[in-house]
Image (tube, rainbow, N blue to C red):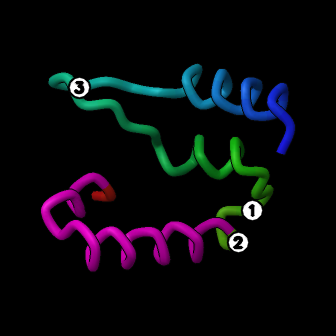
Amino acid sequence: MKHDQVSRLHKNFEDYVHEQDGVEFWFARDLQVLLGYSEWRNFSGVQKKSQKIVRNVKPRDFRSFC
């Protein structure tokens, strides 16, 4: 991926970040659009796979997906 593409994507993600009690987070529906998924049903599978990975690697951080 080219540097300008990475910079543009980073800015887009930062535009959608939320913060609560010093913790940054993104809403799944926003991530869906940012990652180029036009339909929730297509993105939902990706989200569930991510949850499974985080649950296995860092169980303490799994609450981030709730």
Amino acid type for the residue under numbered disc 3: Gln
The verdict on residue 36 being magenta is: no
Number of other residues with Cα within 10 Å of mark 3, as a class: few under 14, some 14 to 19, many 20 or more = few
- Residue ID at (86%, 37%): 2
- Residue ID at (28%, 73%): 57
Decide if residue 24 is on the left or right side of residue 62. Answer: right
Decide if residue 45 is on the left or right side of residue 18. Answer: right
Decide if residue 35 is on the left or right side of residue 4. Answer: left
Amino acid type for the residue under numbered disc 1: Glu
Count of labels shown? 3
| Res 54 label | none
Between marks 3 and 1 in the image, the one whose residue lies nearer the viewer: 3
Say which label, 3 or 1, has the lower sequence index.
3
* CB within 8 Å, label 2 to label 1: yes
- Where in the figure is residue 51, as x and y percent of width and height? 38, 70
- Residue ID at (75%, 62%): 39
Q: Secondary structure at mark 1?
A: loop
| Residue underneath mark 2 | 42
Q: Where is residue 4, by image quadrant?
A: top right
Q: Which residues are magenta?
A: 43-64
- Where in the figure is residue 66, as x and y percent of width and height? 28, 58
The verdict on residue 57 being magenta is: yes
| Res 39 label | 1
Q: Secondary structure at mark 2?
A: helix
| Residue underneath mark 3 | 20
